[in-house]
């Protein structure tokens, strides 16, 4: 579709531009400002060049948080995407159960993030939580407030609980857009269910899967409230992901320079990921 | 194989419901029962936790605060996003692609990056601890989202609709409000739902921007958990109450929810 060129369209975009710029550009410039300055309080700021960036990139604390973040993001992707596809494939296509499934599955997505954290915190408590008590009764030594491994596992399971439905809903929308005629043709050709999945369902889901993977990638990179409420980043630093570390620096320790530098590096990673997302999605749309 | 495929969604839904069930049961238990024994059902069924919430203004005002800024945010986001989405779906103009991409980056930006500077910004214009501050701050990610979703829906409406209306003598505002908006009503519904949802679940910015008068319910919960020790029953009751608005709105958009998550692009 060829759209006409019309520069007056800028007027329509103006309100959005003003609002988002107010919220995004002013704070971003503040962050840039902090990241190149040193302060000793009293609002005295000195130029410090790229000092904070060098210090940050060399610091173990940042590197550890970054590696932990990558580890977390790829683990939840490796679980949520296949699981989401399997569940979407097994879901009923017609009838009253569809609505029931959709509403129940979407429910975790609508719960405030700190309530999700609090809910899992209670659910997994070793003495009085359903999950923790059951595991301990079965003979596992499980205490997520003290064992780093258990804390990780709980965090991953919580995220799978919270967000797999997003993948399911997207895949399901992709699957229901396949006309019945495709399946009939496949049946006439005697295609196996694997062949149907590989050559009919998977290609149809490609678009929505791209969106699912990238949304999950980015949202898991930004995750803050849930792990903070669940474990507070502990035990030790074992579940301190990037956002938690950053908030600790900026809001807790008020280390404005290092926090600014960290924000910018963090933001650049997100920017790169967004750009890949955008390019892939636009390519999908052209096809 | 096919006959047992219903098992997979069933098990998954059971897994989803378990923590929610635990939260709800706990909200009907007394603190003694929660800490003293392990019971699957409340032995001494009590509504005391809910009573505390409904009678203590600091608790129930939390809900009003949340609902006020979420509604304000939805109205502001949609009002700004509608014309912009129309411009993106119908015209080409200088820098349109870059602008569209820039909007997306704000949807993806980590709130932790913006928390401190946004706090300083809103303090400096004396909007700290007001509902409008949270509503405006949440437009950071809700406007981009609405623009993307609405643009997706609007691009599904053929241009001929616009052209026919102009031939019939409609002015642009008349066409936009009387013909175009009703045509994409479902898209507006979905966008409104997502604004509601992301404003409702977000806490970092909402908590940073408020102290007393506009404090969201979710932040009040966190405070209670940390100051008065372990009032788990109360915490559970408050948590249960935050699930209800979500459950109600999901029902209305259940068939369109996926299209919204796909940013209007399924």
Image (cartoon, coloured by chain):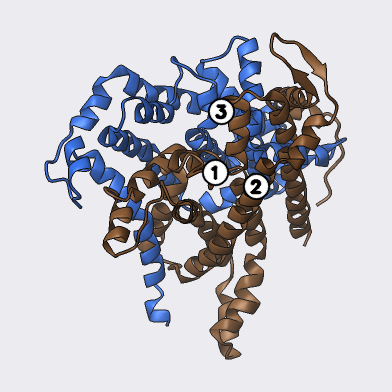
Chain colours: A brown, B blue
In the rendered image, residue A271, in percent from the top left (x then y), is placed at 75, 43
The residue mark sitting in front, 1 or 3, is 1
Q: Earlier in the sequence, mark 1 or mark 2?
A: 2
Q: Do circles 3 and 2 both sit on a common chain?
A: no
Out of B53 and B69, give the one closest to the viewer: B53
Lateral position of residue A277 relative to residue A180, left or right: right
Residue at coordinates 50% horizontally, 69% vertically from top-left?
A: A86
In what element is the residue under mark 3? helix
Disc marking residue B205: 3
Chain bearing tag 2 is A
Q: Chain of mark 3?
A: B
Q: Secondary structure at mark 1?
A: loop
Q: Note whether residue B167 is visible.
A: no
Image quarter where the C terminus of chain A lies is bottom right
Q: Residues within 10 Å of mark 2 (few under 14, many from 20)?
A: some
Between A170 and B60, the one lying in front of the other is: B60
Where is residue B173 shown, x and y percent of the image? 68, 27
Task: Please report, as a chain letter, where disc 1 is located.
Answer: A
Query: Does dot 2 land on a helix, a strand or a loop?
Result: helix
Residue B133: quadrant of the picture:
top right
**Quadrant in the rendering for residue B149:** top right
Which residue has dot 1 on it? A237
Marks 3 & 2, CB-CB < 8 Å contact: no
Of the pair A31 and B166, the residue shown nearer to us: A31
Label 3 near label 1: C-beta < 8 Å?
A: no
Q: Which residue is mark 2?
A: A64
Residue occupying image coordinates x 63% and y 27%: A250
Note whether A32 is above or below A61 in the view shown: above
Q: Residue at x 76, y 42 (%)?
A: A58
Please give the label number shown on residue B173.
none
């Amino acid at each position: 579709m060829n759209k006409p060129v019309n520069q007056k369209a800028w007027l329509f975009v103006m309100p959005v531009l003003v609002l988002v710029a107010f919220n995004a550009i002013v704070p971003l410039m503040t962050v840039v400002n902090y990241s190149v300055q040193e302060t000793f309080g009293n609002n005295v700021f000195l130029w410090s060049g790229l000092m904070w960036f060098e210090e940050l990139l060399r610091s173990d604390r940042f590197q550890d948080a970054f590696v932990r973040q990558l580890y977390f993001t790829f683990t939840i992707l490796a679980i949520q995407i296949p699981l989401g596809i399997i569940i979407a494939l097994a879901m009923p296509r017609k009838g009253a159960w569809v609505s029931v499934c959709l509403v129940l599955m979407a429910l975790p997505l609508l719960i405030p993030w700190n309530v999700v954290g609090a809910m899992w915190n209670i659910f997994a408590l070793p003495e009085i939580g359903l999950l923790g008590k059951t595991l301990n009764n079965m003979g596992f030594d499980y205490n997520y407030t003290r064992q780093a491994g258990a804390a990780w596992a709980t965090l991953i399971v919580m995220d799978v609980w919270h967000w797999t439905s997003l993948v399911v809903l997207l895949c399901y929308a992709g699957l229901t857009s396949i006309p019945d005629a495709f399946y009939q043709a496949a049946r006439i050709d005697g295609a196996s269910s694997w062949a149907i999945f590989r050559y009919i369902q998977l290609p149809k889901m490609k678009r929505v899967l791209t969106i699912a993977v990238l949304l999950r990638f980015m949202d898991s990179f930004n995750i803050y409230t849930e792990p903070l409420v669940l474990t507070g980043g502990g035990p030790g630093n074992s579940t301190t992901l990037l956002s938690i570390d950053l908030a600790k620096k900026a809001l807790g320790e008020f280390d404005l320079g290092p926090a600014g530098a960290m924000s910018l590096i963090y933001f650049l990673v997100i920017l790169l990921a967004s750009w890949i997302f955008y390019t892939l999605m636009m390519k999908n749309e052209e096809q | 194989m096919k006959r047992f495929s219903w098992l997979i969604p069933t098990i998954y839904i059971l897994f989803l419901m378990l923590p929610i069930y635990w939260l709800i049961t706990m909200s009907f238990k007394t603190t003694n029962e929660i800490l003293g024994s392990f019971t699957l059902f409340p032995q001494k069924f009590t509504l005391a936790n809910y009573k505390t919430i409904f009678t203590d203004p600091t608790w129930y005002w939390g809900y009003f605060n949340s609902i006020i800024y979420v509604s304000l945010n939805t109205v502001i986001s949609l009002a700004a996003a509608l014309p912009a989405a129309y411009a993106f779906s119908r015209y080409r103009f200088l820098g349109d692609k870059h602008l569209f991409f820039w909007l997306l980056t704000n949807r993806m930006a980590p709130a932790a990056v913006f928390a401190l500077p946004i706090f300083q910004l809103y303090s400096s214009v004396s909007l700290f601890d007001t509902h409008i501050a949270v509503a405006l701050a949440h437009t950071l990610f809700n406007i981009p989202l609405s623009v993307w979703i609405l643009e997706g829906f609007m691009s599904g409406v053929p241009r001929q609709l616009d052209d026919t209306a102009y031939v019939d003598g409609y002015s642009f505002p008349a066409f936009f409000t009387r013909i175009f908006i009703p045509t994409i009503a479902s898209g507006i519904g979905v966008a409104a739902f997502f604004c509601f949802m992301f404003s409702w679940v977000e806490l970092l910015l909402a908590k940073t921007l408020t102290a007393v008068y506009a404090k969201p319910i979710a932040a009040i919960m966190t405070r209670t958990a940390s100051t008065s020790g372990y009032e788990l029953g109360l915490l559970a009751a408050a948590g249960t109450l935050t699930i209800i608005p979500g459950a109600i709105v999901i029902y209305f958009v259940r068939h369109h929810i996926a299209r919204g998550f796909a940013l209007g692009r399924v």
